[in-house]
Amino acid sequence: MAVTADLSAPASHSRPYRLAYRGARPEPTSVSVGDVRFGADSVAVIAGPCSVESRDQILETARAVRAAGARILRGGAFKPRTSPYDFQGLGREGLELLAEAREETGLLVVTEVMDSLDVDLVARYADVLQIGSRNMSAFRLLQNVAETGKPILLKRGYQATIREWLLSAEYVLAHGNDRVILCERGIRTFDAEFTRNTLDLNAVPVLKQETHLPVIVDPSHGTGRADLVATMSRAALAAGADGLIVEVHRDPAAALSDARQALTSDAFADLMDDLRGLSRYLGRPIG
Ligand code: PEP
Ligand code: MN
């Protein structure tokens, strides 16, 4: 008797992420942020600086990314820095500047919340709460952000397996909030000589099978190199990503964080032109 193996199945069939699991909800979940939808017929692009640095910087960048076709502005006000001596973000002032940029441009705002103590404050300003890679497994924080009812951009822990990541999403879902957008941002592997992280694009089609939640890709942290961002953005869309989050700075060399991976505003506009063609070809226009 012929034995046939289901090669698409994972080694373990256990899916403890029962709410995130696609088997429980076969139709994709689309997460709406204002009139932007993740996981629907179009792909959405988030762009902006790694950190909010000044009023001029964030307003100028917001105008530029808006003009190029981004729908959501990113910018960190609370920054998870490896060294305590590095720029930690402007905190509340940064949130106020993001709100001003939203007011002026109409862009919605995503920003990171690092600590449960700051959830109420950040939720007063942000349209989407970002959980950073270093906090993917901060389970109390996940529960606290879930309670805001806001969409949660859940970045993959740089040392996390896809299963662990889905279980972190499950913490948010199990706490009554199903507005979770997963973000692949690269994992730490043995080879960091040429790239900051290894962007795991395998995760995109795997997640499309395993979960109904939308998945976006961060080619900026995924590579750590501005010169690789366009190529990996195209690859992410071709792999089926529901969107991208891209770092843009008006003067990358002067950026207070992640200088080497930021695109100039012009390079971002060129990328968007390029992606518009590709996304039409893929049947999911940039929306
Ligand atoms: C960021 O988005 O600037 C950031 C710190 O990302 P990550 O948590 O993926 O490192
Ligand atoms: Mn960054």
Image (cartoon, rainbow, N blue to C red):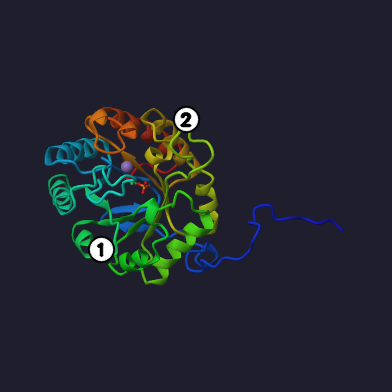
Residue 71, given in percent of the width and then of the height, sits at 27, 45
Q: Is mark 2 within 8 Å of ligand 1?
A: no
The disc label shown at residue 194, or none: 2
Mark with earlier residue (1, 2): 1
The residue that mark 1 highlights is: 119
Q: State left or right for residue 279 relative to residue 251.
A: right
Q: Quadrant of the N terminus?
A: bottom right
The three-letter amino acid code for the residue at tag 2 is Phe
Residue nearer the viewer, 155 or 105? 155
Q: Residue at x 21, y 35 (%)?
A: 64
Q: Is residue 264 above or below residue 154?
A: above
Q: Is the C-beta separation of discs 1 and 2 under 8 Å?
A: no
Q: Is mark 1 within 8 Å of ligand 1?
A: no
Residue 17, given in percent of the width and then of the height, sits at 51, 66
Q: Residue at x 33, y 40 (%)?
A: 246
Mark 2, Cα crowd under 10 Å, few <14 / some 14-19 / many 20+, is few
Residue 259, given in percent of the width and then of the height, sits at 30, 33
Residue nearer the viewer, 200 or 18? 200
